[in-house]
Image: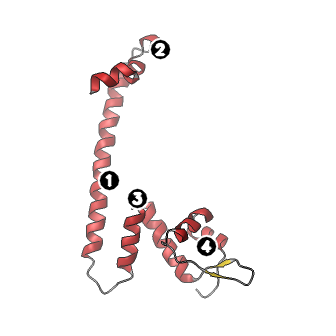
């Protein structure tokens, strides 16, 4: 792509907010673009490719630091992809832990909901479980 893109067109093409693009530039994740004679940002095809990469990695839940590492690895294409595998496996393991934590949380909420007698708020087991005395009992 040899056409210059405005920040608005780049945002639209990647489904990224303009503010997010500026942030990625500010933290060095996306190279600062050239400026037009009117001092507008002008983006190239490489910006579009990199922002698409960043966007997809972020959609998959990779942290900014992980995206930075992955982009650095992607720039060294002749290198073994073992480092990429390590990052992806660490991320998957973190997701697996979060799923387990959320599953336990859902079970705890299910138990609270099941204990509800559906009478008055004064008799509500859910409200009781959320109160300060419940926190003291759990520690």
Q: Are marks 2 and 4 in contact (CB under 8 Å)?
A: no
Measured Cα–Cα span from mark 3 to mark 2: 39 Å
Pick the residue in front: 84 or 20.
20
Q: Please say if 8 is above or below 108.
A: below
Pick the residue in front: 119 or 7.
7
- Residue placed farthest to the right in the image? 38
Would you identify the image quadrant in which residue 56 lies? bottom left
Measured Cα–Cα span from mark 3 to mark 1: 9 Å
Label 4 belongs to which residue?
10
Helix, strand or loop under label 3: loop
Pick the residue in front: 96 or 90.
90
Label 1 belongs to which residue?
95
> Is residue 46 shown left or right of residue 4?
left
Task: Bin the neighbour count of mark 3 within 10 Å (Cα to Cα): few under 14, some 14-19, many 20 and up.
Answer: some
Q: Where residue 79 sits: x, y (%)?
A: 28, 84
Helix, strand or loop under label 2: helix
The numbered dot on residue 31 is none
Q: Where residue 103 sits: x, y (%)?
A: 31, 40
Label 3 belongs to which residue?
61
Residue located 64% across and 85% down the image? 3
Helix, strand or loop under label 4: helix
Q: Are marks 3 and 1 in contact (CB under 8 Å)?
A: yes
Label 2 belongs to which residue?
121
Q: Where residue 121 sits: x, y (%)?
A: 47, 14
Would you identify the image quadrant in which residue 68 lies? bottom left
Mark toward the start of the polypeptide (3 vs 1): 3
Q: Are marks 2 and 1 in contact (CB under 8 Å)?
A: no
> Is residue 119 shown left or right of residue 12?
left
Mark toward the start of the polypeptide (2 vs 4): 4
Measured Cα–Cα span from mark 2 to mark 1: 36 Å
């Amino acid at each position: 792509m040899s056409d210059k893109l405005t920040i608005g067109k780049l945002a639209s093409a990647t489904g990224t907010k303009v503010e997010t693009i500026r942030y990625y530039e500010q933290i060095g994740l996306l190279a600062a673009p050239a400026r037009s004679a009117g001092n507008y940002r002008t983006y190239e095809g490489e910006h579009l490719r990199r922002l698409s990469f960043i966007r997809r990695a972020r959609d998959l839940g990779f942290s900014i630091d992980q995206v930075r590492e992955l982009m650095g690895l992607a720039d060294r294409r002749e290198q073994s992809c073992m480092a990429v595998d390590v990052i992806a496996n660490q991320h998957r393991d973190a997701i697996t832990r979060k799923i387990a934590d959320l599953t336990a949380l859902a079970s705890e909420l299910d138990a609270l909901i099941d204990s509800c007698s559906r009478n008055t708020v004064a008799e509500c087991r859910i409200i009781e479980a959320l109160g300060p005395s419940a926190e003291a009992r759990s520690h």
